[in-house]
Image: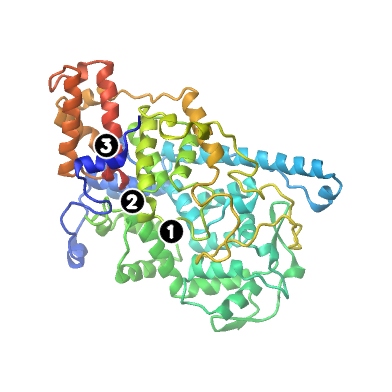
Amino acid sequence: MPFHVLTVALALGLAPLGGSNESAPPTATTFAAARVEWNARNAEHLLNRAGFGARPAEIEAAVAAGQQAFVDQLLAGFVAEYEPFSVERFERPDREELASMDEAERRERINEVQRHNRRQLAQFAGWWVDRMLEGRHPLRERMTLFWHGYFTSSARDVRSSAAMIEQNELFRTKGLGRFGELLAAIVRDPAMLEYLDNNQNRKGNPNENFAREVMELFTLGEGNYTEQDIKEAARALTGWVTRRGEAAYVKGRHDSGKKTILGVTKNFDPDSFLALLLEQPACPKRVAKKLLVHFEGREPSTARVEDYARFLKSKDYDVSAFLRRLFLDPEFYSADVVGARIAGPIDYLVGSARRLSVEPPPTLLWLAAGQLGQRLLEPPSVKGWDGGQAWITTSTLMQRGNMAGMLLGVVKLEDVLRPEVLDEEPEPGDSMGPEMGGAGDDGDGDDAMRPEPKPNAKGDKPTKKKNAPGKAGLNGELGQMSRMLSDGYVPAINLCVRMQRAGAQSDAAIVERLADELLAVALTPESRAGLVEFLAAERETLGVADGGLLAAGRGAESLLRRLAHLILSLPEAQLS
């Protein structure tokens, strides 16, 4: 049966999540003259935040390279090139095609496109997770994930796997470049145009959804514009629509009249509108704060935001320059930053797999992360995932431990789920939404199968969805996970040999070494004592003395895997 996390936490008397046991950080004055001691602790912290978990050999290589050289290497990546995912387009039937079919043919055609789209989306999700696991360009994949939560679109509403994949590739290719260039690309991105209803935004009948999110979420933030600014901005964004999955400019739909936005009157189009936003003081502050919160895992001070915003603006919104400065900043390595961020499901699962050096099916991690509340390519709303403490509930904390146990091969899916759930197949529309693959928009904004408007950052205009955010597709995906685990996945690890090579023989040394490899933060004294007690008690059942466990054969390996499971179930394991 699964080893439940809450039982562990209560038994060991663990400290609550979200804090560090280290002393208070130095003052701002101290930071000004401080230099980062480039050691294993700080190298691991950088790898955790700029990537997805660090293996011992990677930490050693980072320390040996030196801080500045290693930061530059992270920005450049560890390989010169990569092969993009090969995208296939599954065209949605247009209105004329649908009209020529009877009802049965129409439904079959739509279902066929849905199936192809679902399959390709799952294949791509696995491809993306595999890039995270490989670690060849960890920062590029980290920024792809960041922008996916910043410029949010969802496959449930976009209805095209190709559009979602191409948007993801946009983040991958431009995510370390200039923010202004990425912003300009995103307002012409087919997935975003579809997601934020710009197909319905036309001269004489503007739709404000896209303009509102561009100002509220992408650039300025609430309080830095008026409702009238939104109305005028919507006019500036008219003309861009999607046709057969591609972005297209329809001149007749664009409002070429003068608009007054943020006190400036001119004939705004998308480019001049975005240029105006980039010049507003609120824009670099919002971008800088989002980046700081993501990488530091805490609410930055006003002074810190303003400092980094000035720097970002002075570098023409160069994201790489921003990150290079941040990764060399002593405050980034302070005690209240290291280990203070709660890992999201993807961070937790990919990081655990990398630290364990196991190779689970990448799609399995995508499905598991969805069960924990972070379904890649299907964020819950236009503001993405809340993150932080929102990641941890009684249910998800328990399930995280169970998922880690599955990576180790010590927990079976059927032990933690109802048997009838495992036998259920996905219903039409699961994972991609009931509209995926429906009739295409020809640019006139009158698509009969169009989903309702997406919820904005305040949660207005909710979409109709079969399942709550983070729980979609329950019927089918747990069965898929079960089949992946039963189709031959075996964690190819030997923890006994790993401990022998590290020279860890005693119970205390084994606990210390294994925890050091698997955790991003140090064990609390209470956790350490509880783990040593657990290991000693289980070792005694094997009739082995302290110091002789590693020679006890298969029983020892099984015990070390259960110990690793216990470590990854601790509150400390939820921090990165």
Where the N terminus falls, by quadrant?
A: top left
The image's mark for residue 342 is 2
Name the element at disc 3.
helix
Q: Is residue 542 above or below residue 136?
A: above
Q: Nearer the viewer, residue 64 or 509?
A: 509
Q: Relative to 544, is 13 above or below?
A: below
Q: How many numbered circles are shown?
A: 3
At label 2, which amino acid type do we have?
Ile
How far apart are the two marked residues, 2 and 1, measured between alpha carbons?
A: 24 Å
Disc 3 designates what residue? Answer: 567
Image check: 184 left or right of 419? right
Looking at the image, which is closer to me, 128 or 95? Answer: 95
For this view, does 393 lie left or right of residue 80? left
Task: Give the labeled residue for mark 1.
Answer: 319
Which residue is the extreme one toward the right? Answer: 100
Label 3 near label 1: C-beta < 8 Å? no
Circle 1 crowding by C-alpha within 10 Å: few under 14, some 14–19, many from 20: many
Mark 2, Cα crowd under 10 Å, few <14 / some 14-19 / many 20+, is many
Q: Position of residue 273 (x, y in %)?
A: 58, 73
Foreground residue among 83 and 500 = 500
Mark 1 vs mark 3: in front: 3
Marks 2/1 in contact by CB < 8 Å: the verdict is no
Callouts 2 and 3 close, C-beta under 8 Å: no
Q: Residue at x 77, y 47 (%)?
A: 93
C-alpha gap between disc 1 and disc 3: 36 Å
